[in-house]
Image (tube, grey):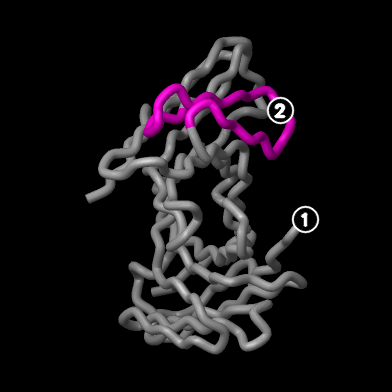
Amino acid sequence: SQTIHQWPATLVQPVGSPLSLECTVEGTSNPNLYWYRQAAGRGLQLLFYSVGIGQISSEVPQNLSASRPQDRQFILSSKKLLLSDSGFYLCAWSVRGIDGYTFGSGTRLTVV
Amino acid sequence: GQQLNQSPQSMFIQEGEDVSMNCTSSSIFNTWLWYKQDPGEGPVLLIALYKAGELTSNGRLTAQFGITRKDSFLNISASIPSDVGIYFCAGLIQGAQKLVFGQGTRLTINP
């Protein structure tokens, strides 16, 4: 069966520090992968999505970047965090959008 | 871009009451999905709808794909405390690689 792993679960980082959040999927090949941010427990903002290795689409200009070095690995990064980067980050995967997304358990990021 | 208007934004009900929420759009969708998010967790898929007019149930939950393909609703019957959370609708446009999400309905149940 397919599973999605996202870590860490919580993270507290100082302003200006770098960020790396990792997401991996098991049990499937060629998934679509997505990064979402959720602020204040409401609304899912799509940040990036990828339909293949090295293919990244950015939805919102911001202080973040994404990479997909392997088929089932999706990484969210920042060189210098801002206070406004705080939020709940969710990774998700799908088979070409069919049957919806399966979400990871999320990372709570607090920038201090 | 495409947007989904989800309402209500919040609901405060008594345990045992029925709940109804809906999503509308100016765009036509080929798939409608309903998710539930518990606090501190990722959203979990509740019901998926693939045909206009389709009515699908999952226990106490019932969802319908609107005939016009521009709307969907979710009903919860006889609410219980574990129904608390945020419910999201989502739609998929044919040929698109990404879902469009509603803004969510936060359900609170008073004991």
Q: Quadrant of residue B47?
A: bottom left
Front residue of B100 and B39: B100
Front residue of B111 and B39: B39
Residue A9 appears in view: no
Task: State which chain disc 2 sits on.
Answer: A
Residue B69 sits inside the magenta stretch:
no
Seen in the picture, residue B50 relative to A101 is either above or below; the reply is below
Count of numbered circles in the view: 2
Does residue A57 appear left or right of residue A1 in this picture?
right
Tell me what residue is drawn at x 40 percent, y 41 percent: A30
Give a yes or no on whether discs 1 and 2 share a subunit.
Answer: no
**Magenta segment, which residues?**
A53-74
Tell me what residue is drawn at x 59 percent, y 65 percent: B91
Label drawn at residue B37: none
- Tag 1: Cα neighbours inside 10 Å, few (<14), some, or many (≥20)? few
- Tag 2: Cα neighbours inside 10 Å, few (<14), some, or many (≥20)? few
Seen in the picture, residue A64 relative to A96 is either above or below; the reply is above
Element type where label 2 sits in the image: loop
Element type where label 1 sits in the image: loop
Image position, residue B49 (x, y; %)? 48, 76
- Amino acid carrying label 1: it is Gly
Image position, residue A33 (x, y; %)? 48, 41
| Residue with the mark numbered 1 | B1
Residue B74 appears in view: yes
